[in-house]
Amino acid sequence: MEAFKYAQVANYSDEDLMEYFQQGKEPAFNELVKRYTDRLHNFLFRYTHNHQDCEDLVQETFLRVHKSKQSYERIAKFSTWMYTIALNLAKSLYKKKKRMQKVSIHKDETDPNDFEMNIESPTILQDEELHQKLSLEKLEKALMQLAPEFREVVVYRDLQELSYDEIAEITGVAMGTVKSRINRGRAQVQAMIESYVDIGTEF
């Protein structure tokens, strides 16, 4: 790799920054913190629905990244590796508190890659169709009724826009199982939304 240039820190890829950080370049780590603080908070809030818990988990995630920097290998995307750490910490917190109250599906304005998940088609939806018009309240209610293993992968795929490979890596679940859970989760969400419409549920 070329010599680390402090003036160009913002131009390096996440993976380059991690390699420089492994070489002792602390500004590289600071840039990763800058890039991912808001994204991590938004990601974790979907599981905790508690801003204080999110703040604590974000700090703990970056602390783990800092302490475990030498365990990172470039064969994995930095974001996948980091989200895996964050998810494991969130699951540990959930086991302690025995709760994950709510999934927030509102767009995070601080993250240009984030978006609202909307559903329109009455059939099981394909990726590109998952962002059409629908009441966010109805969608949120449906997501919260999903089993955790289905909600987890649907949030990853349709809110975080992670690839199937990344989801499989983060969850430790086989690719076929990931796809099956996403399809089943989407189908259940759709069925619940249709039932809300049929009975005229008020929100």
Image (spheres, rainbow, N blue to C red):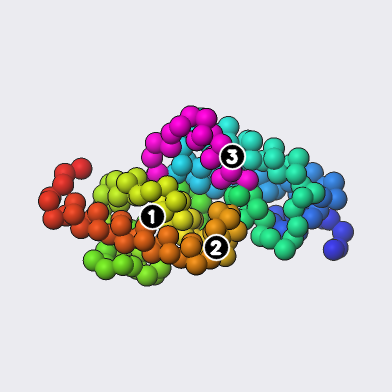
Question: Mark 3 to mark 1: distance in Å?
Answer: 25 Å
Instruction: From the image, tell me which residue sits under label 3.
Output: 89
Residue 164 in the figure: left or right of residue 143: right
- Residue 22: give x, y in percent of width and height: 82, 50
Name the residue at 75% across, 44% down: 68
Residue 162 in the figure: left or right of residue 195: right
- Name the foreground residue: 143 vs 35: 143
Residue type at mark 1 is Glu
- Residue 20: give x, y in percent of width and height: 81, 53
Name the residue at 36% across, 61% down: 184
Q: Earlier in the sequence, mark 3 or mark 1?
A: 3
Start-end of magenta stretch = 85-106
- Asked if residue 139 lies in the magenta stretch, the reply is no
Instruction: From the image, tell me which residue sits under label 1.
Output: 116
Question: Mark 2 to mark 1: distance in Å?
Answer: 27 Å
Instruction: From the image, tell me which residue sits under label 2.
Output: 174
- Residue 46: give x, y in percent of width and height: 45, 44
Residue 13 vertical placement versus 201 (above, below) = below
Element type where label 2 sits in the image: loop
Q: Earlier in the sequence, mark 2 or mark 3?
A: 3
Quadrant housing the N terminus: bottom right
Residue type at mark 2 is Ala
- Name the foreground residue: 39 vs 78: 78
Residue 153 in the figure: left or right of residue 147: right
Q: Nearer the viewer, mark 2 or mark 1?
A: 2
Question: Mark 2 to mark 3: distance in Å?
Answer: 21 Å
Element type where label 3 sits in the image: helix
Residue type at mark 3 is Leu
Q: Earlier in the sequence, mark 2 or mark 1?
A: 1
Q: Residues within 10 Å of mark 3 (few under 14, many from 20)?
A: some
